[in-house]
Image (cartoon, rainbow, N blue to C red):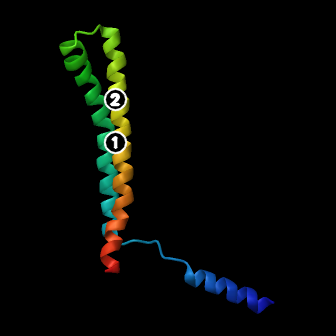
C-alpha cells in the first residue's frame, strides 16, 4: 500500500505541466499590461472632458448638468471597450505563440 501511494504521487508530479515561461513572454505580458493600464486611465478621462466640452456643450448646446451625465456615460462605455480589448488581447497572446510551436 505504501509503494502504491508513492508511485501515484511521483507520476502525478512528473505529469504536471511546467507553467514557467521564458523572460521574453514575461516582458511581453508586462508591456501589454502596462499599455492597457495607461489606456484605462487616460482614455475614459480624456473622452469624458472632450465629449463634455466639444460634443454635448459645444455642438449639442446641452446644459452643464446634462452634459455631465452624458459625458459620464461615454467614459463608462470607454472603460468597457478597453476591458474587452484587454481580455481579447490577453486571450489571444498565449494562443498565437503556441500555434507556431505545434506546426
Residue 41, above or below 21: above
**Mark 1 surroundings: few (<14), some (14-19) or many (≥20) residues within 10 A:** some
Residue 63 coordinates in the image, percent (x, y): 29, 7
Residue 98, above or below 70: below
Residue depicted at 31% across the width and 14% down the height: 67
Residue extending furthest toward the top: 63
- Residue indicated by mark 1: 82
Residue closer to the observer: 20 or 78: 78
Residue 76 coordinates in the image, percent (x, y): 38, 30
Decide if residue 15 is on the left or right side of residue 87: right
> Along the polypeptide, which appears first: circle 2 or circle 1?
2
- Looking at the image, how many numbered discs can be counted on the residues? 2
Q: Quadrant of the N terminus?
A: bottom right
Residue 98 coordinates in the image, percent (x, y): 35, 72
Residue depicted at 32% across the width and 67% down the height: 96
Residue depicted at 31% across the width and 62% down the height: 27
Q: Secondary structure at mark 1?
A: helix
* Residue 5 placement: quadrant: bottom right
Q: Quadrant of the C terminus?
A: bottom left
**Mark 2 surroundings: few (<14), some (14-19) or many (≥20) residues within 10 A:** some
* Residue 78 placement: quadrant: top left
- Residue indicated by mark 2: 75
- Answer yes or no: do the residues labelled 2 and 1 have beta carbons within 8 Å? no
**Residue 9 marker:** none
Amino acid at each position: 500500500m505504501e509503494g502504491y501511494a508513492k508511485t501515484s504521487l511521483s507520476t502525478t508530479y512528473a505529469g504536471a505541466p511546467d507553467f514557467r515561461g521564458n523572460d521574453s513572454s514575461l516582458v511581453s505580458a508586462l508591456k501589454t499590461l502596462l499599455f492597457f493600464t495607461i489606456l484605462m486611465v487616460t482614455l475614459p478621462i480624456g473622452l469624458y472632458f472632450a465629449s463634455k466640452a466639444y460634443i454635448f456643450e459645444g455642438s449639442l448646446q446641452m446644459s452643464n448638468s446634462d452634459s455631465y451625465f452624458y459625458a459620464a456615460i461615454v467614459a463608462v462605455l470607454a472603460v468597457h471597450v478597453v476591458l474587452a480589448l484587454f481580455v481579447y488581447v490577453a486571450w489571444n497572446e498565449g494562443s498565437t505563440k503556441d500555434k507556431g510551436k505545434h506546426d
